[in-house]
Amino acid sequence: MYYDRFAKLCEMNNVKPGQVSKGTGVSTATLTSWKQGKYTPKQDKLQKIADFFNVSIDFLMEKDDFVSCPNCHYVYSPFSDTDIEAHAEFHKKYEKAVSVYGHIPAEETVVKARESFINEFRDTTKTNPERIVAYESFLDYDFLLDVINSGYSLTLDRGKHDYREISTLRITYRTPEELVNAIRKAHGLTPIEDGYYESPEIIEWVQDTFDDPDMHFLHKMKLKMTPERFKKHLEFMEDSYKLENPDDDIGC
Ligand SMILES: [Zn+2]
């Protein structure tokens, strides 16, 4: 049973049963008996074969008709011509994107790496140079996630992405001025120069209300700033918002 699936996988991946045997440790004798219908490999061997082809064991055991492309990660049925065509189309976009942006790992990998680097960046027990290195890696993965979420658009601008992220760094993560400015300098951006976020009162307030909406934050900021400074601050927030939401004219 299931040998047809095995044969289909060999065909799709352009490999010979002998190569599968080498890659999985399942003997060629086993594969031959399987082909002749004398024997069906046991679960553990089927799992090795499924892993070799990067498919689920359910696919190999004919319980599921879908596979995921190991490169572009498009999920499709290799038994449906429409699906095969849709995948080929998507795969072309993926390959073009790789030629523009470089290697693009699976979404799951990108999400995990992005999360882990931003947590490292926010870890105040780390030194500033360590946090900066982590932040630069965060930018790499955050951009890759934009590329994936856009369906491999070729027109994403890395410079704009970085500017948008760095502009909101202060507000989003309440990052100390010194650290923000070191990152801004590395990206050729002018330093920002207010010290309000570092006052003990603000730090305490931020800790108490970390999840509060930005308007609460702004209200507190207003009490701490001259009207001119507050106006500049609002403009800065509006600019950041517009960069992130180019089609939305409501502002923040
Ligand atoms: Zn693909």
Image: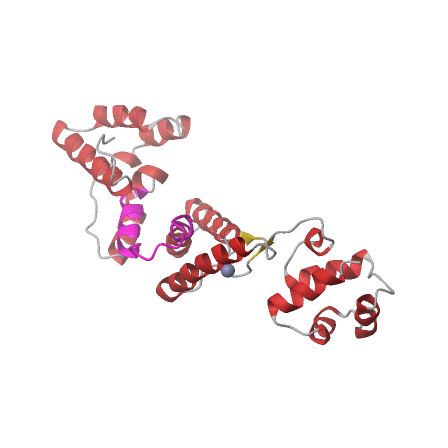
Q: Residue at x 21, y 49 (%)?
A: 191
**Residue 167 position (above or below residue 26):** above
Q: Residue 147: percent from the left, percent from the top?
A: 39, 53
Quarter of the image with the C terminus is top left
Q: From this viewpoint, which residue is outermost toward the front?
A: 81
Residue 109 colored in magenta in the image: no
In this rendering, position of residue 34 left or right of residue 143: right
In this rendering, position of residue 189 left or right of residue 87: left
Quarter of the image with the N terminus is bottom right
In this rendering, position of residue 119 left or right of residue 4: left
Q: From this viewpoint, which residue is outermost toward the right?
A: 38
Tell me, yes or no, if residue 36 can be seen here. Answer: yes
Number of on-image labels: 0
- Colouring: secondary structure
**Residue 89 position (above or below residue 199):** below
**Residue 228 position (above or below residue 126):** above
Specify start and end residues of the magenta stretch as a single range.
145-169
Q: From this viewpoint, which residue is outermost toward the left?
A: 228
Main SS of the magenta part reads helix
Q: Residue 138: percent from the left, percent from the top?
A: 41, 52
Q: Residue 36: percent from the left, percent from the top?
A: 83, 68
193 or 28, nearer to the observer: 28
Q: Residue at x 42, y 50 (%)?
A: 145
81 or 231, nearer to the observer: 81
Q: Residue 221: name its quadrant.
A: top left
